[in-house]
């Protein structure tokens, strides 16, 4: 199996507008490690050779991840042409140029579907099904991750509460195993979030961290989920050894919110993920603004501060997942959208004026 975050292919085309355009096929076998620093140059060459051989033999499962992250009005039409070609044409080896090429024969059907034991296979994922697959020239089976049923949600809630009670050192009799499920089903907005398998654990986490209660509005749920993650970084906690921001650095939650909002705004306007360089620049900008406003000296050099906070945001804040080598995203895009929207209204913890909000929306 080979995972290809599809925006990486689109992104390298933008970076190489003046050079020769690489086909999607070439990108698959020339970038099997997606430039990961975990491999030496020699290892990358060997892996590229192995993938190339496997593609010719029809032994590869390629997963194109995140079609919805490619802007429709800019890049998706060319990308879909490449995907159609990859689906339809066979793969040949060009001995003269030592590379793989598409077969010249157009089959007007997906290549190698008649033999279940031979042929490369492709999976294309998209966060929202929408009409993203309409430009594919062939019928392909579509699988949708469905919302949980009531029974599945109840089973999840009971398992979660049982685990929490065990972790807290309480007997299961002290907990009503249905209490989380009952709290979720009493609120239609929260219920619709909780049946999403990606968000169920977030809802459950907010419930247990806020005295076995859930907010009435989903926007408050996002706020509380992020608030709790930031709180664990800022305020002392006996059970939490990861408490660097206030104790070591003298920073507050307002600054952390500001950094999160800047990151969300960046991700919301870009195709690519968040690289460490961009994360450094964002944190540096927010720290300088913070120092200017507060007239306080930082407890260490700016460079050391940035390096420490980069590490915390990458691995300890609880809001990011690593999305490929040197590429980070929020654990769920819902958080990104919420924080990006919040950055329109709030700046450095203060509400913007109506005129300023209007100008931001207009731009």
Image (cartoon, grey):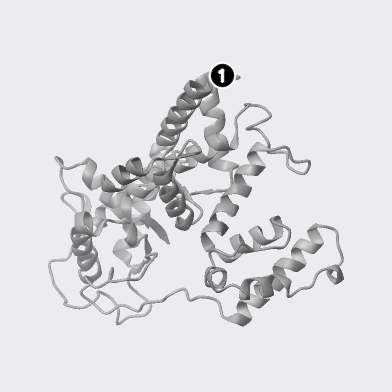
Residue drawn at the location 30% of the way across and 79% of the way down: 113
- On the image, which quarter does residue 356 sit in? top left
Residue drawn at the location 16% of the way across and 76% of the way down: 107
Percent of width and height locating residue 126 = 37, 65
Residue 327 seen in this snapshot: no
On the rendered structure, is 123 left or right of 330? left
Percent of width and height locating residue 347 = 44, 38
Query: Which residue is more in the foreground, 99 or 170?
Result: 170
Residue 143 seen in this snapshot: yes
- On the image, which quarter does residue 234 sit in? top right
Percent of width and height locating residue 10 = 26, 51
User: Is 30 drawn above or below residue 191 in the view shown?
Assistant: above
Report the quarter where the N terminus lies.
bottom left
Residue drawn at the location 15% of the way across and 45% of the way down: 20
Query: Which residue is more in the foreground, 315 or 168?
Result: 168
On the rendered structure, is 94 left or right of 320? left
Percent of width and height locating residue 359 = 29, 43
On the rendered structure, is 134 left or right of 285? left
Residue sitting farthest toward the front: 354
The total of numbered circles placed on residues is 1
Query: Which residue is more in the foreground, 29 or 249?
Result: 249
Badge 1: how crowded within 10 Å, few (<14), some, or many (20+)?
Answer: few
User: Is 68 drawn above or below residue 183 in the view shown?
Assistant: above
Residue drawn at the location 34% of the way across and 51% of the way down: 49
Secondary structure under the numbered disc 1 in the rendered image: loop
Report the quarter where the C terminus lies.
top left
Which residue is under mark 1?
296
């Amino acid at each position: 199996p080979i995972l290809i975050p599809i925006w990486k292919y689109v992104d390298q085309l933008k970076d190489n507008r003046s050079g020769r355009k690489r086909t999607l096929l070439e990108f698959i076998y020339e970038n099997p490690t997606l430039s990961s620093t975990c491999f030496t140059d020699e290892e990358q060459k060997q892996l590229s050779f192995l993938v190339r051989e496997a593609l010719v033999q029809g032994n590869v499962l390629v997963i194109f991840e995140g079609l919805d992250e490619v802007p429709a009005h800019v890049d998706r039409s060319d990308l879909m042409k490449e995907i159609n070609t990859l689906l339809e044409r066979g793969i040949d080896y060009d001995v003269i140029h030592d590379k793989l090429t598409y077969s010249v024969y157009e089959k007007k059907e997906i290549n190698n579907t008649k033999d279940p034991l031979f042929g490369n296979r492709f999976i294309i994922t998209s966060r929202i099904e929408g009409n993203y697959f309409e430009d594919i020239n062939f019928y392909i089976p579509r699988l949708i991750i469905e919302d949980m049923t009531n029974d599945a949600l109840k089973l999840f809630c009971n398992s979660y509460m049982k685990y929490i009670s065990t972790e807290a050192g309480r007997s299961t009799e002290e907990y009503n195993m249905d209490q989380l499920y009952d709290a979720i089903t009493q609120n239609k907005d929260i219920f619709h979030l909780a049946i999403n398998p990606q968000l169920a654990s977030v809802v459950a986490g907010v419930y247990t961290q806020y005295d076995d209660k859930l907010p009435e509005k989903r926007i408050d749920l996002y706020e509380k989920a992020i608030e709790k993650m930031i709180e664990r970084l800022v305020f002392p906690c006996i059970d939490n050894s990861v408490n660097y921001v206030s104790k070591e650095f003298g920073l507050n939650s307002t600054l952390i919110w500001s950094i999160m909002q800047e990151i969300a705004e960046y991700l919301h306007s870009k195709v690519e993920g968040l690289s460490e360089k961009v994360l450094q620049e964002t944190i540096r900008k927010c720290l300088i603004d913070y120092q200017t406003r507060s007239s306080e000296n930082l407890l260490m050099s700016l460079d050391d501060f940035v390096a420490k906070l980069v590490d915390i945001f990458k691995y300890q804040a609880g809001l990011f997942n690593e999305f490929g080598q040197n590429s980070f995203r929020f654990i769920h895009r819902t958080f990104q959208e919420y924080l990006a929207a919040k950055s329109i209204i709030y700046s450095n913890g203060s509400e913007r004026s109506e005129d300023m909000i209007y100008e931001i929306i207009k731009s």
